[in-house]
Image: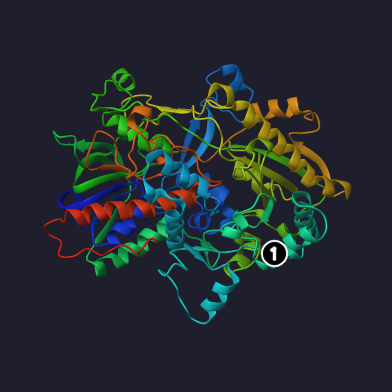
Amino acid sequence: MDDPSELEWDYIVVGSGAGGGTVAARLAEYGHRVLLLEAGGDPHDGGERMPADYDVPAFHPFASECPAISWNFFVEHYADPAKQAADWKRQPQGVLYPRAATLGGCTAHNAMILIRPDDADWKQIEDLTGDPSWAPKKMSAYFRRLENCRHRPVLRFLARLGLDFSGHGWNGWLTTERALPRQACLDPQMLRLIADSAQAALVRGPRALGAMVRLFLGRADPNSKRQIAGRNARVWYTPLSTRTHRRVGSRERVLDARDRAAAAGGRLEIVTHALATRVLFDASQRAVGVEYRRGERLYRASPRPHPGTGATGTLRARREVILAGGAFNTPQILMLSGIGPAEELARHGVQVRVALPGVGRNLQDRYEVGVVNRLRADWQALAHARFDATDALFAQWTAGSGMYITNGAAVAVAKRSPAAGKGPRDLFFMGLLAPFRGYYPGYSAEVAAGHNYLTWTVLKARTENRGGRVTLRSADPLEPPAINFHHFEEGTGDARADLGAMVHAVQFARRMAEPLRRRGLIAAEAEPGPDVRTPAQIEQYVRDHAWGHHASCTCAIGPRDQGGVLDSDFRVHGTTGLRVVDASVFPRIPGFFIACAVYVIGEKAADVIHAAALAAPAPHKEALHAPAAVA
């Protein structure tokens, strides 16, 4: 590639994850010249256990700890040291919070679950901004542009006939598949797990049987409108963003768009190992480019940081700069560029360009815990599993079968907690065939070794707490920011409602495990354990051990005088030519899993940005391609 600093770009996108990769690819397809900066490399370029850790769905825990692609943030859950010390997962520098620095961002190490947000999540933004383009019907159309739902029986049948409905509201660019290998169906413990969870989540009898039938036939789809609707608990499989049971995500999207953009008159160039350090502005507060450092492992969140600082360069954008570094790095870049809380910037000697108190505030996440059960015997489906490229299960995966085509979740249940009232379901449970107690250095090795465990991972969605903070440690762009989620009463909102929902969730997870216990299949509960029984004891366990991995909301859309950082078109208040398109844009954390919502806003942002370009064409453009219709 030519030297990017000597070329003219319409847009510079910082970050190649679900937001940045999506918006960069679509803008290039619309005929724009787009430069995409990624601080890491390509996971297929090599490294330890690469590319298998990237490609194989069951290897995602190892991808999150692979030094070749990981950034390890260490966060706090409380400002009170005594409260924080109660969590055994805490290291001297904090609690591990894995992020990815590689092409594709965190879509390179996530569990590949693609579940759309509830309509209420979009309606909340529409009501906050008064912008009808955020209406649920509009956002559903963007989801249809995204999802390529090959797991649905009718579309599998049409695909066999050679019929491709891509771009016609049927299939999008992100393939999702159902992973229920034959080996799982032959494991009697697995069949009992699915049957028991269906009966616990629903009433006994025909309805539970019907749920099992829908599950095995692929009709229990959380992205089906009919499945999302209703007040009852649901038993689901989790659609995975895989193609022929290999991980797909933002990486595949941008590589494909790069190859095809020229046909649309556009260009997409990807520069890896390029760490953006600040946004450049002209005298009118217009973003005109970025400053960056070039080199591998420069950022000190790397498990093996490079001792140097890299060569500094600058890049210029004719139209706009788009930040998509995620909920930790985007507010850091904004603050280093002089945009953020004035007192915070002054403390680190950063000249204030735009005083925006909301930058880095409003940090939100799920609350998660694991109810971990030790079985008396190993899962038959995991026999001989070593979780590397030399075992028999890996050979099965290469043929498109076996347990490695899954992400480790056998079944999922969604339900409402008592605190949710008539609102959307707020509890999600996954039955994992491994011990999972949260994130700490070496956690993936425990997952690989535990062939006789069942963990009901509990996820509390739509949490009340909006009190987390991302703040600068220093003005050094290579130093990760300080991050504190301020759990429960240290934060904001109704902490009692969140705690009550988590107590209910732990009790429900135990209820789903009880039939296996009565049959003698479970030897003991390892976490929370037999000494944690009463609601008060469970509540304290949750306070001490809850974690999360969907950080979001630190550059929220909303009015400036209410702490908002962005307008409804993703523009940073007080600037021109600068937008944010990543998990930090949400006022409230949406849905159960964040990746789908970020992909969707990436598609929406591309249309918003392209519409602005159509209203003011660049001189070198003869024609730009219109976006696909969004009804």
Say left or right for 345 vs 97. Answer: left
In this rendering, is residue 89 above or below 185?
Answer: above
Amino acid residing under circle 1: Arg
Q: Residue 342 in the image: x percent, y percent?
A: 30, 21
At a point 41% along the width and 35% down the height, the residue shown is: 328
Depth order, front residue of 478/151: 151
At a point 78% along the width and 49% down the height, the residue shown is: 200
Q: How dense is the environment of label 1, judged by Cα within 10 Å: few (below 14), some, or many (20 and up)?
A: some
Say left or right for 420 vs 343. Answer: right
In this rendering, is residue 29 above or below 48?
Answer: below
Q: How is the image coloured?
A: rainbow
Say left or right for 124 vs 511. Answer: left
Please, which residue is most extreme toward the bottom here?
Answer: 161
Q: Quadrant of residue 351?
A: top left
Which residue in the protein does label 1 denote? Answer: 214
Q: Residue 284 in the image: x percent, y percent?
A: 15, 35
User: How many numbered tags mark residues here?
Assistant: 1
Q: Is residue 67 visible?
A: no
Please, which residue is most extreme toward the left here?
Answer: 619
Depth order, front residue of 10/585: 585
Q: Quadrant of residue 372?
A: top right
In this rendering, is residue 423 above or below 160?
Answer: above
Q: Residue 542 in the image: x percent, y percent?
A: 66, 30
Q: Is residue 146 visible?
A: yes
Q: Residue 132 in the image: x percent, y percent?
A: 38, 49
Residue at disc 1, secondary structure: helix
Quadrant (top left/top right/bottom left/bottom right) for the N terminus: bottom left
Quadrant (top left/top right/bottom left/bottom right) for the C terminus: bottom left
